[in-house]
Image (cartoon, rainbow, N blue to C red):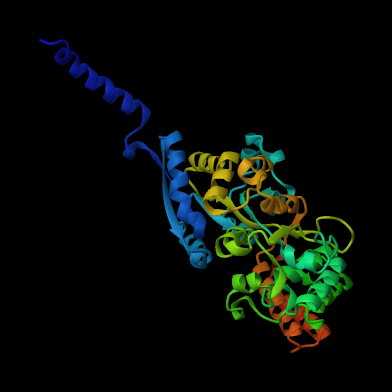
Amino acid sequence: MSRTRSLCPRSILLACALILSGCQPEEEAEVVEFWAFGSEGEVAHELAGEFERLNPEIRVEVQQIPWSAAHEKLLTAYAGGNLPDVFQLGNTWIAEFAALRALEDVAARFENTGRKGDYFEGPLDVAVVDERMLAVPWYVDTRILFYRRDLLEAAGIASPPRSWEGWFEAMIRVRERHGDFGLFLPIDAWEVPVIFALQQGAALLKDGNRYGDFLHPDFRAAFDFYLRGFREKLTPAEASGQMANLYREFGRGYFAALITGPWNLGEFRRRLPDVDAAWDTAPLPSFDGSYPGISLAGGASLALAAGSTRKEAAWKLIEFLTAPPQQIRLYRLTGDLPPGRTAWSDPVLAGDHKAQSFRRQMDRLLPPPKIPEWERIASRIAAYAEKAARGEMAPSAALEALNDEVDRILEKRRWLLERGR
């Protein structure tokens, strides 16, 4: 009997033992359900695969859902008692699902990770509602300036101004030299009027978020400044959908700057290779001399369902997906910006000066009011801002109508709070 033949059965048994010790059979693994949306959903399987490799006792069932269907899908699942263990949650939805008591308070678990100090304050604040931490920031979506450096330099402006007044003066000079427009502000978006309001110190709501505060002098000042660009013909009165091709128009200099988000870093590079050296980014200016000025803390977080029966395994998945190495990986896969400082020191971000404008902006982020009604209110801000910008309503009348409508939206909230519910 040869040596090979005599060792073969024992080798096979040993190999089987090693395999079995490193990976439990699928039917014995604990299953965690995970829903992710949009582009994050497209890469969720890949991210979960790495988690499963490191945690063979847990199997992740990923469901990819389009953003357009995500909100309704979550509400339907909540109503049916079928929320997944872990799910992506748009930051403006956290308060809504908090009111439904659908989210587990993860403050103690998060504290144990030792990562709290690594997060920027704005994204972290978004996840806290009524002093409970109800999600962990996954990525940040905020707004900064994208501008044509070559057009500004041709107009004698060597660097992007740090005040809004300076930017308007710059836009006037660009228009005088090149024609067309200086700044594109989508007329149907609520973000820019709200950013101006936050920079002016406006609260937006008052009396414990029970009433609108859109007649306050701070909001009036912000609203007037927003409309100034349209009044002085520095900004085209167009919605995003009315512009045939935003990238082409930016590329040909139809406007010299716009306020937009991180997804356009990749889009501009991909769509405008011929003018890649001609455009740049900058944090938002301010009204008060500070720099950067305040921007919005948008994005998405990961939530643990309050009704989950697999909370320990589910939290393990959240802890993995929000760790700095995975924040970097998510950026490489999708362009989503990390909410933590450590990830920003990775060469892929530290060496990208256009992305670094977002890094500087991270220090000055604020969330909009954290109430379930916010998205309805935001849509009304956009609607009345558009009416005023198009000249269909006087600014004062638009603000009075907005305030009245927001008071009606908040009527049920007042009723519930007055009864201690």
Quadrant placement of the C terminus: bottom right
* Residue at 89% over, 73% down: 217
Q: Nearer the viewer, residue 12 or 347?
A: 347
Quarter of the image where one finds residue 406? bottom right
Vertical order, 123 against 417 (above or below): above
In front of the other: 367 or 294: 294
Is residue 307 at least partly visible in the picture? Answer: yes
Q: Which residue corresponds to the image point at 14% horizontal and 15% vertical from the top-left?
A: 5
Which residue appears farthest toward the left when viewing the image? 1
Asked whether residue 214 is in view, the answer is no
Total number of numbered labels?
Answer: 0
Give coordinates of residue 189: x percent, y percent.
67, 73
Q: Residue at x 23, y 19 (%)?
A: 11
Q: Relative to the observer, which residue lies in front, 221 or 179?
A: 179
Give coordinates of residue 158: x percent, y percent: 82, 60
Q: Is residue 193 left or right of residue 324?
A: right
Q: Residue 147's spot in the image, x, y percent?
A: 72, 64
